[in-house]
């Protein structure tokens, strides 16, 4: 029981660090600044449902994907570890997300007479991209989910999915209260949280690399 609780805590912290709900809340607040509370709630729920569905699929189909492409678990741990480490490294140096600026730059300037249907379609796309993919269910999140669920037993898969579901609830709650959270923490607070999560993420990524190397050494020798 203690081992299960410890594994659950490790999985949750790994997901928490790589998804970084606090920093992503700031991005969500910027992307939905001109929307009503009802629209924000709908987009938050939709983006998290899409994210959860994607991670569940990769968690359940991890073994099948491995067999289909001839991928080994050590290869995933090495590649995923390097990827997670790089994400953490950039976060540690205070590199913020460019999704907000990129999203705004890609949107054409609209005239005041545009229809509400066009706005609704744009808001619907916003829940899918950039929120669900790649902001929440990015390569690092997918690699982390597959790494923890690919151990083989159903308990690992259940723990991975359960912890990610818990994090999705936390993230969705943060999104719904995004304006209050951003105002309370401020830019300095967001910077501190981002760097702290980056440090944790870099350590987790390096641990995945170490585990991958340990698995490869007996095969080579």
Image (cartoon, grey):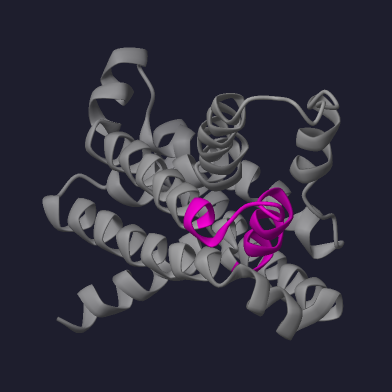
| Residue in view at x 63 percent, y 63 percent | 25
Would you identify the image quadrant in which residue 36 lies? bottom right
Q: Where is residue 211 in the image (x, y as percent from the top left)?
A: 47, 53
Chief SS of the magenta region? helix
Would you identify the image quadrant in which residue 122 lies? top right
Report whether 7 appears left or right of 93.
Answer: left
Q: Where is residue 158 in the image (x, y as percent from the top left)?
A: 18, 56
Q: Where is residue 113 in the image (x, y as percent from the top left)?
A: 75, 26
| Residue in view at x 22 percent, y 37 percent | 60
Which span of residues is magenta-colored? 22-40
Q: Can residue 129 be seen in this view?
A: yes
Which sits in the foreground, 33 or 71?
A: 33
Rendered-image quadrant of the N terminus? bottom left
Report whether 12 appears left or right of 136.
Answer: left
- Is residue 87 a member of the stretch shown in magenta? no
Name above or below for residue 70 compared with residue 9. above
């Amino acid at each position: 029981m203690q081992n299960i609780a410890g594994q659950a805590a490790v999985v949750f912290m790994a997901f928490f660090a790589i998804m970084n709900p606090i920093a992503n809340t700031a991005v969500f607040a910027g992307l939905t600044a001109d929307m009503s509370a009802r629209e924000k709630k709908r987009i938050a729920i939709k983006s998290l449902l899409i994210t959860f569905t994607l991670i569940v699929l990769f968690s359940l189909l991890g073994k099948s994907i491995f067999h289909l492409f001839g991928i080994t678990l050590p290869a995933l741990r090495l590649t995923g570890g390097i990827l997670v480490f790089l994400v953490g490294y950039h976060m540690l140096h205070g590199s913020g997300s460019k999704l907000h600026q990129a999203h705004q730059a890609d949107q054409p300037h609209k005239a005041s007479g545009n229809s509400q249907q066009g706005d609704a379609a744009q808001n619907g796309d916003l829940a899918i991209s950039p929120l669900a993919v790649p902001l929440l269910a990015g390569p690092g999140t997918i690699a982390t989910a597959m790494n923890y669920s690919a151990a083989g037993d159903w308990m690992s898969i259940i723990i991975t999915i359960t912890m990610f579901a818990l994090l999705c609830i936390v993230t969705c709650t943060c999104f719904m209260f995004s304006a209050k959270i951003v105002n309370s923490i401020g830019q300095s607070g967001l910077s501190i949280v981002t760097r702290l999560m980056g440090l944790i993420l870099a350590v987790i990524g390096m641990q995945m690399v170490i585990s991958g190397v340990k698995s490869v050494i007996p095969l080579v020798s």
